Image (cartoon, helix red, strand yellow):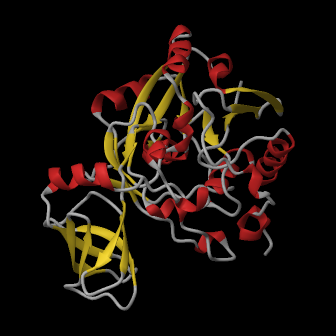
Amino acid sequence: MENPDLSIESYFYDLPTDFIAARPIPGRDGSKLMVYKAQSDEIVHTTFHQLSQYLKSTDLLVLNNTKVFPCRLFGNKLSGGSAELFLLSLQHQKGSYPALIKSSGKKKLGDKFQFGELKVEITDRTDAGEFWIKPNFGLIEFLEYLESHANVPIPPYIRDGVADDQDKKDYQTIYAKKLGSVAAPTAGLHFTEKVFESLAQKNIDRAFVNLEVGLGTFKPVQVDNILEHEMHRELFSIETEELKKINQADSLIAVGTTSLRVLESCYDQGEIKLPETPPPHSTNIFLYPGKNVQSIRGLITNFHLPKSTLLMLVSSLIGRKKTLELYEEAKKNNYRFFSYGDAMLILRDE
């Protein structure tokens, strides 16, 4: 391939498993923070609670206030055998919800499953191998049951995806508001009230967008040429007051890849504008080297998996080679990687 930036193999890096964080740092904001100043090509190693020192009073932080819902249940197929249910979204159609189901044998319409007091029936299936399931509970009762009985969907590379009650706290930002995601916007996990207080002392304000993080965020790129990768589509929204605040800001710092994807999807000639089509809005934007990201001055993000679209997104800001250099620098300095790991602040200008 002539352009290595388009080859999936160019986004590989070696990461021994002991770099993968199994739990977050106690206290959240004690995590390491690598600050990369692109203009001067300077790297600073600090901790997250020092974040305000590296931002300007004219910056506005844009955070994703989505809330992760417990969506994994273990039970049985009524005709026999064990079963696992992974609810994909709370967006329902006539009382049916999209889900993945693991069980023995072929699954067909009308199959019934039991997860404690919850019973579900398959009402439809998609070409992608997903199912629509109808629970025996109404929406409120269903949500309450999930909250008390279902597991949080931590990624498979963290403790083999086996969650416990502690993850219900750890795998949620302190500002999570709108239930709907099956993965956390992990850059936001580092924020504490103390961090927000230190930002406020410098008059650094914040605004919120909402993007429902779907299972597609973990979808591996399975093509050699990344241009052939089909990006997942996710629902997003921005409230009127938040949009106004965003457009009045001198410069934007996106907290996490999901916030950046919302902002860049809505960027239009120097403004953030919602699509003219009626809501719900969705995006399948794919950012990689060669894409001109225009909406932000900086990005706060974690360290991402090799060959992932998230690694490509970071590379769209500072280039693939520089991104991989910084990842090697992180390894030399014992940074912790992935969802529960440490953070990076990329500043494109100073």
Q: Is residue 91 above or below residue 188?
A: below
Residue sitting farthest toward the top: 201
Asked where in the image residue 41 lies, by quadrant, the reply is top right
Q: Nearer the viewer, residue 20 or 202?
A: 20
Q: Is residue 337 above or below residue 308?
A: above
Give the number of marks: 0
Q: Position of residue 300 (x, y in %)?
A: 61, 36
Q: Is residue 75 above or below residue 160?
A: below
Q: Is residue 25 visible?
A: yes
The residue that appears at 42% across and 38% down in the rendered structure is: 272
Q: Position of residue 212 (x, y in %)?
A: 38, 51
Asked where in the image residue 169 lies, by quadrant, the reply is top left
Residue sitting farthest toward the right: 332
Q: Quadrant of the N terminus?
A: bottom right
Q: Nearer the viewer, residue 337 or 145?
A: 145
Q: Position of residue 185 (x, y in %)?
A: 49, 44
The residue that appears at 30% across and 35% down in the rendered structure is: 239
